[in-house]
């Protein structure tokens, strides 16, 4: 008989029987365990009840013992006579008060007179005594007990011929009195004395058997109401039945073993015919015949025969069709692609050569197939290619394979041309092959040469005469301006301004070209960022005066040393300051601040000008980008300054960002790492993290929430709560800078308002309807859900967060 594997019918049958029996066993164990626990719980309930009664009796006895000692002393004839004649009996009271503290829990007994004043004390400590404690006893003439904090105060009057002459007051420390009694309990307890004093050893509440006793038969009343609750967790009850449960489970398992053996044998016997039939199917000896006289097995064998024949015919037809179709498609793609495609083997011999490659190199496919690929390379590169291939096949890092690069290729006629090569590795029938895609980039190189030549022409042919023109115009206006007519002076001034604009444009274009070509060099030295900021303000002071704008410096650190290119940083400051000045309203001020961060410094340039429309925020750092095309004519500029500044700052491993609101102004800021952080540039690329604001969105408008998260993903962490419980959890885990609240809320409004009033979080309302908000002083902005403009809301919230939390910048 063939060997049965783990997935055989016999194993499945035995596993099924085992699962059923195991389920019955577990059900039986669970039911009996519950019944046994219930029985133990009833016994434990009675035991706890008896223990509670006994403990209460002992507590009641202790409390009444203390009270009785004071009552006996107060009612003795010696105490009465000694109080009446206190001068003669003071020595008696000295001993009487001292005797009260012996063999009892009574502490600091005091003797007071008919006016409630202490006239004799066992100890000098009288701070706990207050006259109001004995007023009721002096009036009623009856003893009394008081409970304050964890002390029990017992007061007993001394009466002489029906008149209260004074009394005795003492206090009992309940902690010391009850500790021995409660410490002897082997259960969890909660003892309540009076209305506000509780003794317990429960650290964490757990379900269990609990008994609570407040009054027992024969308990003397008049001291204080006492309630004792004893609890035994269900977990402890399981320990009582653990031995029974283990024995019962072992017995069940021993009983289960023979059943498993019998089930496995029955399964093997039932599965034997099917297993033998399956082995014949695996061997592929068709037609298959059933080894047993069974109509079911015969039908199954016939079905196998028919299905196998159909599959064989369909597979043959499909394989042939796919082969023809696949080959046709591959040939069509390779033959029509505009790039040259060459396939070689591991020895460098060409296997395929498509028509585009024929046109590119001038060879026909029959001429190069079977030849070394070096035939397509200049002679000085042939040996290098063989070395690259040898190194790669020996396990060294790839120089070309999997990496696109520019090369020099050679045509059949011997001419060379620049090309772009991409090589990939593949396996065909287990054989290692390489495919190269070659593209002629001669025209691209020509275009780059023309562009470079143009840039060089601009640099050498335009900038030099333009400088002379600017100097001549400036000299004429400066020296002979007063002698010129108003019309001529206006024309010369316009010419000078346009020549300056043209100079700036040429300089910016040259800088952009250097950035793209990687030729913009930064010379790093140790510089003081505070000095650069102050110098930049001085350099732009006259420009600010022309626009009637003040420059204000707010520096929080005077020694901000960084590794930087001071000239390029001054260029960044000049760009940011000129933009802020140009777009500020006359009479306003541009504020420049320098702050120290945990890992660097931040420079901010803040204006209160026109601001930037939200639709231009995402492309403000693009080249030739300005919020309005009319700005170029109104305030001047090329639209390249911010792109250049961002590249310079990022070249210093810093970041340049901004936030703005239309009509309220803009803040551009950049950060630079400290000296210690910048020292590691050569070893690794530093990682910069932007600390965002924490915003809580309370509501269930999924559309607005999705837009909100998308708009603020780069600057803020947006948490979401759609009910009060989630809001409670969120606010307990972290603080939030802002709450965006859909109003009215689909929750208890009073609880929601109470929660956020307690947290003191600024609120932005997304209103829906006319229902007023009960605390308008907490609301800093309101937006209608049906007409919500996310771009406007984003700019408004940025300014709100900046004004509310000025020490952080989005």
Image (tube, grey):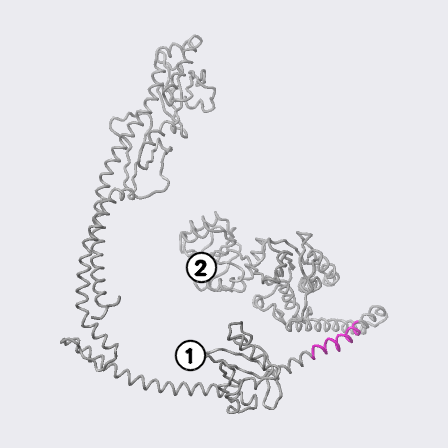
* Residue visible at 73% across and 63% down in the picture: 543
Mark 1 crowdedness (10 Å alpha carbons): few <14, some 14-19, many ≥20: few
Report which residue position mark 2 lands on. Answer: 769
Disc number for residue 430: 1
Q: Which residues are magenta?
A: 453-470
Question: Would residue 648 be counted in the magenta stretch?
Answer: no
- The image shows residue 4 at horizontal and vertical percentages of 23, 68
**In front: mark 1 or mark 2?**
1
**Image quadrant in which you'd find residue 161:** top left
Number of residue marks: 2
- The image shows residue 445 at horizontal and vertical percentages of 63, 81
72 is higher (above) or lower (below) than 763? above
Position of residue 211 in the picture relative to residue 364 (left or right)? left
* Residue visible at 25% across and 33% down in the picture: 50
- Specify the farthest residue to the top: 88
Magenta-colored segment: predominant secondary structure? helix
């Amino acid at each position: 008989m063939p060997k049965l594997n783990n997935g055989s019918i016999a194993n499945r049958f035995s596993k099924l029987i085992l699962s059923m029996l195991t389920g019955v066993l577990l059900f039986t164990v669970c039911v009996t365990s519950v019944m046994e626990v219930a029985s133990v719980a009833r016994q434990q309930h009675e035991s706890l009840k008896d223990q509670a009664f006994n403990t209460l009796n002992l507590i009641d006895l202790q409390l009444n013992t203390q009270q009785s000692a004071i009552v006996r002393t107060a009612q003795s004839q010696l105490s009465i006579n000694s109080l009446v004649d206190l001068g003669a009996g003071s020595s008696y009271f000295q001993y009487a008060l001292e005797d009260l503290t012996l063999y009892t829990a009574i502490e600091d007994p005091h003797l007071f007179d008919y006016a409630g004043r202490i006239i004799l004390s066992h100890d000098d400590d009288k701070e706990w005594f207050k006259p109001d404690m004995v007023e009721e006893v002096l009036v009623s003439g009856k003893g009394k007990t008081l409970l304050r904090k964890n002390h029990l105060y017992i007061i007993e009057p001394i009466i002489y011929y029906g008149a209260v002459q004074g009394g005795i007051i003492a206090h009992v420390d309940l902690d010391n009195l009850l500790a021995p009694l409660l410490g002897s309990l082997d259960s969890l307890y909660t003892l309540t004395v009076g209305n506000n004093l509780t003794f317990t050893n429960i650290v964490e509440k757990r379900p269990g058997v609990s008994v609570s006793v407040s009054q027992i038969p024969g308990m003397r009343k008049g001291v204080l109401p006492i309630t004792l609750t004893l609890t035994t967790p269900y977990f402890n009850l399981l320990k009582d039945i653990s031995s029974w449960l283990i024995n019962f489970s072992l017995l069940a398992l021993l009983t289960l073993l023979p059943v498993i053996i019998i089930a496995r044998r029955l399964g093997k016997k039932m599965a034997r015919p099917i297993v033998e039939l399956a082995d014949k199917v695996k061997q592929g000896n068709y037609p298959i015949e059933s080894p047993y006289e069974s109509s079911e097995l015969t039908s199954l064998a016939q079905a196998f025969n028919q299905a196998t024949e159909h599959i064989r015919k369909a597979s043959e037809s499909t394989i042939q069709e796919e082969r023809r179709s696949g080959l046709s498609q591959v040939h069509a793609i390779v033959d029509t692609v505009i790039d040259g495609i060459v396939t070689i083997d591991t020895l460098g011999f060409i296997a395929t050569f498509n028509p585009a490659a024929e046109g590119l190199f001038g060879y026909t496919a029959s001429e190069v197939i079977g030849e070394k690929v070096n035939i397509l390379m200049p002679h000085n590169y042939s040996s290098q290619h063989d070395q690259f291939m040898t190194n790669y096949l020996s396990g060294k890092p790839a120089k070309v394979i999997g990496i696109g690069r520019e090369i020099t290729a050679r045509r059949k006629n011997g001419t060379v041309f620049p090309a772009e090569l991409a090589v990939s590795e593949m396996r065909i029938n287990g054989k290692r092959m390489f495919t190269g895609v070659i593209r002629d980039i001669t025209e691209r190189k020509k275009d780059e040469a023309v562009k470079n030549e143009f840039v060089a022409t601009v640099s050498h042919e335009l900038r030099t005469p333009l400088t002379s023109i600017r100097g001549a115009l400036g000299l004429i206006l400066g020296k002979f301006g007063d002698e010129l007519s108003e019309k001529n002076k206006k024309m010369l001034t316009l010419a000078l301004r346009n020549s300056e604009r043209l100079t700036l444009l040429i300089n910016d274009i040259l800088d952009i070209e250097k950035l793209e070509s990687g030729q913009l060099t930064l010379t790093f030295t140790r510089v003081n960022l505070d000095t650069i900021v102050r110098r930049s303000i001085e350099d732009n002071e006259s420009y600010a005066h022309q626009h009637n704008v003040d420059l204000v410096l707010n520096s929080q650190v005077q020694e901000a040393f960084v590794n930087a290119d001071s000239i390029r940083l001054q260029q960044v400051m000049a760009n940011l300051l000129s933009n802020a000045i140009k777009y500020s309203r006359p009479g306003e001020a541009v504020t420049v601040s320098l702050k120290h961060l945990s890992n660097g410094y931040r420079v901010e340039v803040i204006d209160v000008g026109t601001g930037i429309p939200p639709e231009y925020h995402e492309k403000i750092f693009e080249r030739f980008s300005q919020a309005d095309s009319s700005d170029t004519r109104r305030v001047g500029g090329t639209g390249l300054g911010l792109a250049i500044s961002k590249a310079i700052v990022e070249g210093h491993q810093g970041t340049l960002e901004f936030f703005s609101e239309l009509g309220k102004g803009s803040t551009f800021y950049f950060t630079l790492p400290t000296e210690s952080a910048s020292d590691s540039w050569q070893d690794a690329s530093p990682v910069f993290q932007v600390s965002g604001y924490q915003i809580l969105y309370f509501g269930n408008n999924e559309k607005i929430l999705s837009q909100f998260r998308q708009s603020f993903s780069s600057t803020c962490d947006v948490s979401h709560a759609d009910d009060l419980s989630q809001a409670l959890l969120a606010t307990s885990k972290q603080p939030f800078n802002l709450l965006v609240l859909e109003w009215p809320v689909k929750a208890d409004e009073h609880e929601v308002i109470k929660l956020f009033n307690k947290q003191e979080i600024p609120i932005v309302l997304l209103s829906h309807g006319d229902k007023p908000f009960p605390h308008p002083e907490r609301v800093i902005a309101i937006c209608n859900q049906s007409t919500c403009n996310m771009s406007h809301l984003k700019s408004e919230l940025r300014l709100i967060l900046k004004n509310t939390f000025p020490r952080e910048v989005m």
